């Protein structure tokens, strides 16, 4: 279990995929699906790199490595119970854990006003976002912006150069002030290095205030220990690394500042199965500065030691180098180098720095990782057992695994359930309320994402969607799950996470899980039977569209093309994050809005894509439709993927089905979005034009923010016209 996606862990993930033991499953949990390479961050601030050039995409890296990636914040670790606590989901068990969560900025918590009015440098992945927010709020500069950088460590100095150049370009010039508590800049550096840096600061007109501390911040003004107060437009807080809050929540030994104590082999002193690296550690016998170069150098040692630990082999020591070549960019195509007390400046040094940094980034570039997503981490060692496993009823998951995973499951109470999980019997028994009809549906799919908790949530929402599309309320559900061949302990963990996800969404929809069936197989698959109840008068159908009705779609499209791109390592992490968030929107609130407004003609968009499901509605209603492609909402990245020729494996079949219906006009690649199969897609409904605007507003208020009117029903049966006309 890799907690945090820092500079050390990206290397661990790669090395495990290439050289790790075959039967190890690596999971990375990180609060962002993109990690920033700190060495290029000031260059990016200076405008020398695009943000995308300094980002390491963790999702494609995990996909390539066959590792599981969980996008979530870790809030604590219990090393006795071997559990990681994760925001918004049940704890996750591990066998071996490694922590690489970086640091926070010193003073953020204890210096008044910093949190509210300054832009802190850590976590580094948020610095650029916050800087861009600042620029959006200040699009025009009548006077040069006044920028203060508090903290003149290497990061503060580079940022001063970077900000000077950024705002010189954007605002004509910039007034940059660098404040530091030390009398001498970088006191551990030689006089020669200091001289080169100070003269470069002077050349650019960057004011230096030394021997002074920033003590209090208010809006637009910073108060100094010298009693001076300086006004600013932008205050960057670059005062060095403080221990991240997580270390306090681990029960692990820390130093007096809160950094995790580790031995020279990067193992924690009390728990041999807990390792840590990077800014968040205090390495036994050393007082290392918080610099990415150490996190980078620790990566291979950490990877080898994790492999050694798993294999029961002796661990090696990490021996930090006493001095290293430090290269500070000056933002104008030059860099300052320092090593062993010598300080030099030049264009060739910038070229050298740029080459070194780009070489590092190339190691994590999805295009250069190769196209084979089937890495050794997909547990082939365990698959060997597959041949010896029984099938038929003997392929059921063991009773003890089931009991362990289900005993803590608190299902939604439901008086009509006479026999359910609480009183296990051969089958479940439920009562049907008088006057209600029972509506039933089943859905089942292969795991499209390697995260059983999220998978459980999505399948539940997806399956209940059919019930909502009928105007009914889901009531009870049964689960069918196939778990990969592995040890009973791992199966128990996987099932526990899967069921927790299913039950979480079931609770939200007031659905009671009443039974299920599990079996073993080559890969994880999961399905749900959902039973709903409805008054006959409120039943909604695919038929019933009237010419003139406006077609309203409640969610953006593109989930399958994005997942296809993810498998090919072509999707950005943030695209997949958004696609998953979109899948986690229940169609329940949208169905309520339609029902309240007497909309009785609707369906949910799933495997056959928008065109396929719309065609079903047109056929059932004996009408046609005109769709304005410009009104379709795309998930982020879906259009780029379609333009790159990527499509889901089901899309060609979806296209064939609809061609027969008389599709007349489509040529551009993004138009193919209508054939994209949707997992947990939105509702499509035909709405009387008199109430359509009001319905759309209500849908947006109900959480379906990207609802749009995509077209109109026409008279000619079976006709489906695509247009881009306004
Ligand atoms: C402006 C700036 C410039 C710098 N330039 C340099 C330089 O040129 N050279 C150099 O050597 N050093 C530089 N540094 C220092 C460098 O950034 C850090 O030393 C380095 O990033 C530490 O690496 P790390 O792997 O420990 O952590 P990080 O790179 O900070 O990575 C930690 C990761 O863990 C994730 N995470 C954090 N908390 C949690 C949680 N609770 N749950 C899940 N995930 C979590 C984060 O999202 C992040 O992905 C610079 C720092 C700054 C601020």
Image: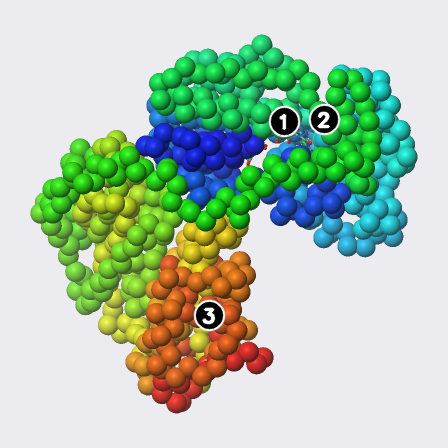
Which circle marks residue 672 in the picture?
3
Secondary structure beneath label 2: strand
Residue placed most toward the observer, 388 or 585: 388
Q: Earlier in the sequence, mark 2 or mark 1?
A: 1
Q: At x 43% / y 24%, what residue is drawn? A: 306
Q: Position of residue 127 (x, y in %)?
A: 66, 40
Residue 653 image offset from top left, x and y in percent: 34, 69
Q: Quadrant of the C terminus?
A: bottom right
Q: Is residue 694 visible?
A: no
Quarter of the image for the N terminus: give it: top left
Please tell me whether residue 624 is drawn above or below residue 7 in the rendered image.
below
Structural crowding at the residue carrying mark 2, measured as other residues with C-alpha within 10 Å and reported as few (<14), some (14–19) or many (≥20)? some
Viewed as shown, does residue 168 lie left or right of 318? right
Tag 2 near tag 1, CB within 8 Å = yes
Q: Residue furthest bottom?
A: 716
Ranked by sequence position, the earlier of labels 2 and 3 is 2
Say which mark, if any, is on residue 326: 2
**Labels 1 and 3: the sequence-earlier one:** 1
Residue 486 spot, x, y in % from top left: 25, 36
Residue 157, quarter of picture: top right
Residue carrying label 1: 293
Q: Cβ(mark 1) to ligand 1 < 8 Å?
A: yes
């Amino acid at each position: 279990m890799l907690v945090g996606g820092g500079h050390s862990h990206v290397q661990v993930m790669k090395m495990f995929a290439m050289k790790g033991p075959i039967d190890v499953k690596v999971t990375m949990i990180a609060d962002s699906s993109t990690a920033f390479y700190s060495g290029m961050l000031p260059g990016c601030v200076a405008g020398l790199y695009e943000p995308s050039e300094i980002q390491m995409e963790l999702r494609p890296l995990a996909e390539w490595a066959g590792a599981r990636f969980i996008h979530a914040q870790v809030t604590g670790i219990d090393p006795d119970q071997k559990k990681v606590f994760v925001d918004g989901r049940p704890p996750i068990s591990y066998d071996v854990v490694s922590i690489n969560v970086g640091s926070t900025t010193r003073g953020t918590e204890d210096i008044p006003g910093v949190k509210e009015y300054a832009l802190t440098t850590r976590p580094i992945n948020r610095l650029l976002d916050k800087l861009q927010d600042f620029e959006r709020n200040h699009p025009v500069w009548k006077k040069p912006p006044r920028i203060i950088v508090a903290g003149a460590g290497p990061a503060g100095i580079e940022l001063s150069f970077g900000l000077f150049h950024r705002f010189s370009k954007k605002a004509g010039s910039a007034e940059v002030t660098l404040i530091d508590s030390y009398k001498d800049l970088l006191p551990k550096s030689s006089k020669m290095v200091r001289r080169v840096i100070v003269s470069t600061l002077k050349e650019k007109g960057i004011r230096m205030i030394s021997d002074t501390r920033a003590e209090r911040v208010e809006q637009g003004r910073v108060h100094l220990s010298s009693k001076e107060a300086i006004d600013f437009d932008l205050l960057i807080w670059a005062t060095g690394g403080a221990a991240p809050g997580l270390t306090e929540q681990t029960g692990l030994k820390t130093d007096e500042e809160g950094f995790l104590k580790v031995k020279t082999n990067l193992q924690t002193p009390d728990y041999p199965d807990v390792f840590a690296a990077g800014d968040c550690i205090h390495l036994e016998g050393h007082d290392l500065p918080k610099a990415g170069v150490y996190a980078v150098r620790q990566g291979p040692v950490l990877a080898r030691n994790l492999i050694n630990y798993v294999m029961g082999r002796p661990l090696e020591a990490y021996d930090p180098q006493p001095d290293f070549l430090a290269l500070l960019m000056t933002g104008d195509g030059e860099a300052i180098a320092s090593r062993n007390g010598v300080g030099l400046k030049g264009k060739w040094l910038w070229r050298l720095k740029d080459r070194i940094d780009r070489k590092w980034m190339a190691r994590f570039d999805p295009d250069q990782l190769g196209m084979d997503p089937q890495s050794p981490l997909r547990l082939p060692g365990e698959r060997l057992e597959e041949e010896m496993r029984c099938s038929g009823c003997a392929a059921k998951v063991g009773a003890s695994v089931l009991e362990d995973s289900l005993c803590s499951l608190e299902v939604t109470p439901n008086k009509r359930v006479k026999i359910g999980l609480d009183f296990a019997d051969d089958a479940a028994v439920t009562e049907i309320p008088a006057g209600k009809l029972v509506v039933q549906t089943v859905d089942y799919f292969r795991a499209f994402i390697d995260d059983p908790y999220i998978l459980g949530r999505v399948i539940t929402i997806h399956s209940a969607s059919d019930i909502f599309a009928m105007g009914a309320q889901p009531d009870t559900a049964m689960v069918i799950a196939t778990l990969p061949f592995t040890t009973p302990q791992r199966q128990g963990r996987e099932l526990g996470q899967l069921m927790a996800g299913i039950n979480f969404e079931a609770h939200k929809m007031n659905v009671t899980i009443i039974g299920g069936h599990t079996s073993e197989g080559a890969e994880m698959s999961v399905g749900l039977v959902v039973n709903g109840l409805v008054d006959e008068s409120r039943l909604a159908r695919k038929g019933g569209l009237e010419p003139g009705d406006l077609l309203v779609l409640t969610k953006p499209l593109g989930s399958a093309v994005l997942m296809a791109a993810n498998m090919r390592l072509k999707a950005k992490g943030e695209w997949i994050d958004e696609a998953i968030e979109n899948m986690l929107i229940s169609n329940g609130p949208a169905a309520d809005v339609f029902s309240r407004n007497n909309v009785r003609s609707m369906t949910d968009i799933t495997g056959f894509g928008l065109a396929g499901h719309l065609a079903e509605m047109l056929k059932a209603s004996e009408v046609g439709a005109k769709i304005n492609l410009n009104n379709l909402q795309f998930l982020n990245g879906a259009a780029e993927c379609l333009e790159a020729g990527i499509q889901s494996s089901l899309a060609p079949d979806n296209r064939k089905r609809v061609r027969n219906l008389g599709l007349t006009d489509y040529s551009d690649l993004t138009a193919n979005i209508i054939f994209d199969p949707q997992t947990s897609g939105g509702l499509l409904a035909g709405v009387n034009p008199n109430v359509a605007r009001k319905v759309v507003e209500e849908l947006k208020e109900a959480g379906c923010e990207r609802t749009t009117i995509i077209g109109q029903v026409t008279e000619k049966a079976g006709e489906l016209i695509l247009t881009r006309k306004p």
